[in-house]
Amino acid sequence: MTSTAPPQAPRPHTFRTVFPVLGLCWLAVFFDGMDVNIYGAVMPHMLDDPGLGLTPATAGTIGSWTTFGMLIGALAAGNLTDWLGRRPLLVTSVVLFSAGSALCAAAGSPALFGGGRFLAGLGLGGLMPLCLAMVMEFAPPRRVALTTGLLMTSYHAGGMTATALGLTVAPSAGWRWVFWAGVLPALIAVPLLLKFLPESPGVLFARGQGERAAAVSDRFGLPRPTPVEAPAAGAKGRFDAVLALFRPGTRWATPLLWLASFCGLLLVYGVSTWLPQLMRASGYGLTSSVSFLLVINAGGIVGMLIAGRTADRFGAVKVAAIWFVLTAAGALLLKSHLPLGVTYAVVALTGIWLFSAQVMVYAATNSVYGSAERAAGLGWVTGVGRTGAVLGPWLGGAVMTAGNESLGFTAFALAGVIGAVAIALVPLASRIGTRGTARGPQARMDNAV
């Protein structure tokens, strides 16, 4: 396991060294965002298609199937990545959601369409924690939040692309062609990932490939992994990584991170799935209603850049808590039928806070968990959070079926408040957990506050 690579002058570990990994993961998450948002972008057209037989209640249920698949994918990826490797699982994730999109495009019934969305969800759920773990590992320690924010701009660029397809392709060629566009990731991203994406040095070291681990570390300016930092191999290692989430210093912070992620993903997927239809039910036209999805994702890109820089300076926990509160305020404002220009402004501002609040929850995990359990920690934070993603689309469908769209905005606001309280309590939970123990976890937590 000990590295035998010859000593060489290490490359400086700067923000520039993470660019190759960030760029490839950016591309993968771009297609993730496009696939997630395609459903909401074309839902008004699908509901108007008598040949498919989709109802608002069924549409909400199918949205929950997607996110249930994402829950399974996130948990599986977080626990298998240190065994099978991050690059193979990331490629598999892209192939799965591309295949799911193809099945949706060809589906002739809601049941078959739902099966395609579940399959896509498996891949979508696995991809996000893998990409986050990769960029966190390769990023300079003081630039983790910024790097995470830059990565997540791709999700919203993909969401804007999906909305543009919904506005241009769906009305003229039909909603099925928008889903056929979701096959592109398998053709574009997979070859690039296989050729250029490096494997995690920590994973390579844990698998006994010390020379390769040292070579990758030196190439990207990373410290060479040590037995303490590397994830333990085998089934016992994966089980130990999960147990580490509940050891002193993390045992109380872990469920709070799960709750914050639950609220954040309820907001992200509830709004992404139902915003056009909620706004349409509030009296806005079809084109304007779909355009709101474009605007909120544009706000999301700006928010990622603001949140990343701000969190590196003031701490991811503080930024996430404030952003959740601002998201709740935006959701309450959208309950009112405001003038169109004012509504666009509120939607854009809400997008700035909404999506980056969730991403800063992910960034906070970097300070709560050490290197050996980071992938498992991220996998469980995203995986358990997916229960919120399951609930969000279902909740939107139930509200629309009941004909009370304002209740949906109230529920989203409540989720923002609960998320703010949960993430704000993480530092206190870490202090309680580390009383009488080593100060390592708490020292990391102090940097995140």
Image (tube, grey):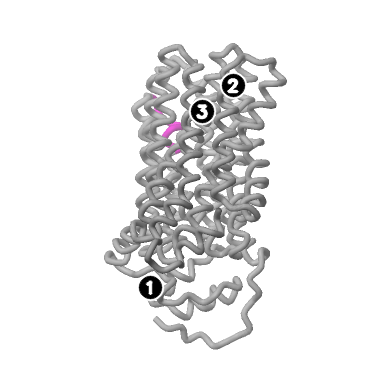
Residue 8, given in percent of the width and then of the height, sits at 60, 85
Q: Which of 365/92 is in front?
A: 365
Q: Secondary structure at mark 2?
A: loop
Using the image, determine if residue 171 lies above or below residue 447.
Answer: above
As drawn, the residue found furthest toward the right would be 341
The residue where tag 2 is placed is 334
Q: Which class describes the residues within 10 Å of circle 2: few (<14), some (14-19), or many (20+)?
A: many
The residue where tag 3 is placed is 413
Q: Which of 25/373 is in front?
A: 373
Depth check, mark 3 against mark 2: the one in front is 3
Q: Residue at x 41, y 42 (%)?
A: 259
Left or right: where does residue 76 sit relative to residue 183? Answer: left
Q: Is residue 329 visible?
A: yes
Q: CA distance from mark 2 to mark 1?
A: 51 Å
Q: Which residues are magenta?
A: 101-108
Is residue 103 located in the magenta-colored stretch of the structure? yes
Q: Which mark sits nearer the N-terminus, 3 or 1?
A: 1
Q: Which of 375/4 is in front?
A: 375
In the image, what residue type sits under mark 1?
Answer: Arg
The residue where tag 1 is placed is 207
Q: Is residue 164 visible?
A: no
Q: Residue at x 50, y 64 (%)?
A: 443
In the image, what residue type sits under mark 3?
Answer: Ala
Using the image, determine if residue 257 lies above or below residue 335.
Answer: below
- CB contact under 8 Å: marks 2 and 1: no
Residue 46, given in percent of the width and then of the height, sits at 48, 21
- In which quadrant of the rendered image does the N terminus lie? bottom left
As drawn, the residue found furthest toward the front would be 436
Instruction: Identify the image quadrant of residue 117.
Output: top left
